[in-house]
Image (spheres, rainbow, N blue to C red):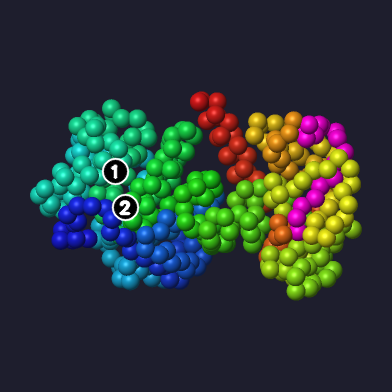
Amino acid sequence: MTNNDVPQGGFAEAGADLELVGISKRFPGFTAIEELDLTIPAGSFFALLGPSGCGKTTTLRLIAGLEEPTTGRIMIGGRDVTSTRAFQRPVNTVFQSYALFPHMSIIENVSFGLKRRGMKNAAPLAHEALRLVELDHVANRKPAQLSGGQQQRVALARAVVNRPALLLLDEPLGALDLKLRRQMQIELKDIQSEVGLTFLHVTHDQEEAMTMADTVAVMNKGRIEQMGNPQELYELPHTVFVANFLGQSNLFTGKVTSSGSDSIVVDVDGTKFEVPTDRAQRHRGLITVGVRPEKVTLHDSAPKQTAGRNVIGPGRVTDVSFSGVSTQYEITLPGHGALTVFSQNTSITSIHRDGDEVWLSWDVDHAFGLADDVETDPASRFPSDTDTSMIATQSRAKLKAELGKD
Ligand code: ATP
């Protein structure tokens, strides 16, 4: 951006499209990005979501110009910036560590970029950016006199004031506690709609990505596995990784015994499950099918087999966790392993106890069929992904620690 591009007020101008074409990045002995093709439309809030080490930060560094791609092109607003140096790209980054200058006041921090580019009257724009994050009243304080959440908002104002065509957010809320993070998620989304810039947000926190982004790309081992709006991704995952990383899933592996235009039937150890044809990524052979825990209903006795519902049972309740608004059950089904069921607490009598015998059913329309190759080894009939279960354990421990702090 040149001095002439600096706006004279208002934050309503839209950002620019970002296009990554055939990007790969190889470090000595390691390929961090396999082959990435991605278009992010101007003015959207896009989240790149994935576990640690999947290549999110590398992607961000390539876009910012801090790394050079091994192959491919980077286009911003239709302009090829692959060989453009970092400081000449219309991009700003907000990091997890706020990186504010400690010896400068808040207003000096926010004006810094504008002044460095030779803008004489930077103060009005800097105050406008501070008003946007509701911190103009602390303009004369030093960073150390603000809370973590306030410093993060200043870092955001400092980036937005430069009106980059593209704002990169690298786990920007990671250092905040749970309550503040939730609040900042809403504020960030509001600010993005207000300023209309293109936001690319990188995170390993699925809830954060789903809460804020219009489009989420789930990244695994240097590739994008699936991309779409949060609801689409959640309701219709295409792979075991996405089904487990974005929320929880109950997965079964079986053989397709019939395949029609409306639905396919899968035999899972003698139990027949139906999946709508257009919700299955494969229609023959061995496949993995699944259903989300909140879509499953528990019954005290065997429900009637009716068209449009998958039924399985009997099983035993092996764990009950009551959380107020809902109860999470673990049900062990002989020959099928353990399933998770979330049940809304709509009636006190509906709570099942440890050891109860139960049947499970769900609407066929909620079932999904995944694209993964299925291993024929019977020991892997209940696909669990070690990466995602490790992440789930870490997230639970982190959440517990944070809730303990509150
Ligand atoms: P995190 O959430 O932990 O930051 P990430 O998804 O952002 O993870 P990256 O930082 O992009 O992951 O790293 C992707 C992979 O590339 C990792 O396995 C990492 O070890 C490797 N990597 C990153 N930078 C280098 C480098 N300079 N040299 C060699 N390998 C690297």
Q: Secondary structure at mark 1?
A: helix
- Specify few, some or many for label 1: CA neighbours under 10 Å numbering under 14, 14-19, or 20 or more: many
- Residue at 38 percent across and 47 percent down: it is 190
Task: Residue 351: say if magenta.
Answer: yes
Viewer-side residue, 13 vs 171? 13
Reading the image, the residue beneath label 1 is 132
- For residue 320, side relative to residue 244 (left or right): right
Q: Are marks 1 and 2 in contact (CB under 8 Å)?
A: yes
Depicted 113 relative to depicted 259: above or below: above
Occupied quadrant, residue 91: bottom left
Residue 377, horizontal then vertical, whole percent:
81, 59
Occupied quadrant, residue 14: bottom left
Residue 123 visible somewhere in the drawing:
yes
Depicted 143 relative to depicted 221: above or below: above
Depicted 337 relative to depicted 24: above or below: above
In the current view of this chain or complex, which residue is farthest to the left?
Answer: 120
- Residue at 38 percent across and 70 percent down: it is 73
Occupied quadrant, residue 230: bottom right
In the current view of this chain or complex, which residue is farthest to the front?
Answer: 347
